[in-house]
Structures are given as C-alpha cells and as structure tokens.
Amino acid sequence: MTYHSFEVVIEREEDSAAGFYAYSPSLPGCVSNGATIEEAKANIREAIALHLETLREKGEPIPPNDRIVHVEELTFALPA
C-alpha cells in the first residue's frame, strides 16, 4: 500500500451562509465544500480519494505534493 499526503485549504464561502470551500493546491480541480469545517474536511477527503482512484484507473501519475502551502495570521496595529 502506498500513502500520499496532500495539503488542504478550507475557506469560508463568499456567501457566509453557504458554508466552507475546500481544495488541495496540489490537485487542481479537486474541490469540495460543506456546511461546517468538519463537513468540508470529510467531503474533501472523499473527493481526493475519488480523484486519486480515477488517476490510477486512467494510468496517470499521482502528482507529487511539492507545493508548499503556508498560512499564517498576522496582526497589525493601526493608529486611531
């Protein structure tokens, strides 16, 4: 068995009532969403599994996880 790891980005949908959007930068076109972050995580996990399965069936290589994704929160003080 071969294991692959992929970064996943989860963002709030532009319409906050719509929930969360999830994707992996290393797998273009592989996206999902969910009403909550946990649902979006479960859904993107399933989407990635299906995506990888389809690549194998077509005899295409599984892309390396060579994209570096770094997310950091920065705080700025602005004069009043």
Image (spheres, helix red, strand yellow):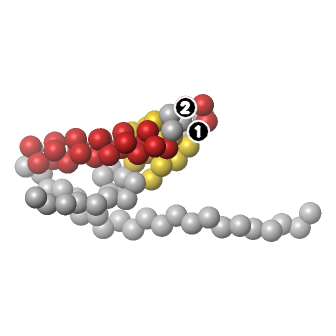
Residue at 60% from the left image edge and 31% from the top image edge = 17
Quadrant housing the N terminus = bottom left
Position of 9 with respect to 62 (left or right) is right
Relative depth, front residue between 55 and 34 = 34
Secondary structure state at the residue bearing disc 2: helix
In percent of the image, x 32 and y 58: which residue is there?
6
Position above or below: 23 against 75? above
- Residue 31, can we see it? no
User: Quadrant location of the C terminus?
Assistant: bottom right
- Residue 69 sits in quarter: bottom left
Q: CA distance from mark 2 to mark 1?
A: 8 Å
Using a 10 Å C-alpha cutoff, classify the residue at mark 2 as few (fewer than 14 neighbours), some (14 to 19) or many (20 or more).
few
User: Mark 2 = which residue?
Assistant: 18
Identify the mark at residue 14; answer none if there is no mark: 1
Q: Give the left or right position of residue 35, taking residue 57 as reference.
A: right
Is label 1 in a helix, a strand or a loop?
loop
The percent position of residue 60, horizontal first and vertical second, equals: 12, 51
Mark 2 or mark 1: which is in front?
Answer: 2
- Residue type pointed to by label 1: Glu
Label 1 crowd (10 A; few <14 / some 14-19 / many >=20): few
Whether residue 61 is visible, yes or no, is yes
